[in-house]
Image: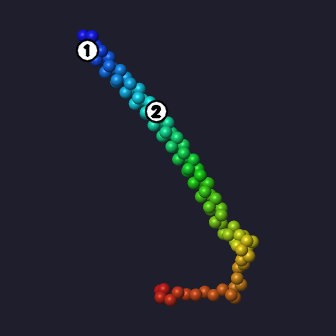
Amino acid sequence: MTKLNLILLAILLCCALSVVTSQHKARKLYIELQQQQNQAKQYEIEWGQLELEQSTWAVHSRIEQVAASQLQMKVPEASRIQVIQLGGVR
């Protein structure tokens, strides 16, 4: 009977250790999941900020201002503009 009790005790200890190990792994994975979700939220915020910045830089008045100030470009006179029609377009 003592030998059976020792075998059952060993099995019980193995089961208890496996439960503790699996709970520990589950907690670690849950913490990692939360960190990944937080990082995804940060990426979404950064993406929104980048889209806003892109729309700000792409405003026509901004483009015209940069073209005039940095590139010394100006709008040509109406008499110098030529309209070319593509052949074959119906």
Q: Secondary structure at mark 2?
A: helix
Question: In the drawing, what numbered circle is on residue 22?
Answer: none
Query: Looking at the rendering, which quadrant does residue 7 occupy?
Result: top left
Q: How many marks?
A: 2
Is residue 52 or residue 36 the one in the foreground? Answer: 36
Decide: few, some or many residues near mark 2? Use Cα within 10 Å; few <14, some 14-19, many ≥20: few
Q: Is 46 located above or below residue 28 in the figure?
A: below
Q: Give the residue drawn at x 65%, y 62%.
A: 56
Decide: few, some or many residues near mark 1? Use Cα within 10 Å; few <14, some 14-19, many ≥20: few
Q: Is residue 61 in view from this perspective?
A: no
Q: Is 32 located above or below residue 73 in the figure?
A: above
Q: Secondary structure at mark 1?
A: helix
Front: mark 1 or 2: 1
The figure's colour scheme reads rainbow
Is residue 6 or residue 90 the one in the foreground? Answer: 6
Q: Give the residue drawn at x 41%, y 29%.
A: 21
Hey, what amino acid is under mark 1? Leu
Query: Quick one: label 1 or label 2, which is nearer the N terminus?
Result: 1
Report which residue position mark 1 lands on.
4
Q: Give the residue drawn at x 59%, y 52%.
A: 46
Hey, what amino acid is under mark 2? Arg
Q: Is residue 48 in view from this perspective?
A: yes
Q: Position of residue 67 (x, y in %)?
A: 70, 73
Report which residue position mark 2 lands on.
27
Query: Looking at the rendering, which quadrant does residue 82 occupy?
Result: bottom right
Q: Position of residue 90 (x, y in %)?
A: 47, 86
Q: Position of residue 49 (x, y in %)?
A: 61, 54
Q: Residue furthest front?
A: 3
- Give the CA distance from mark 1 to mark 2: 35 Å
Query: Looking at the rendering, which quadrant does residue 17 occupy?
Result: top left
Is residue 85 or residue 41 the one in the foreground? Answer: 41
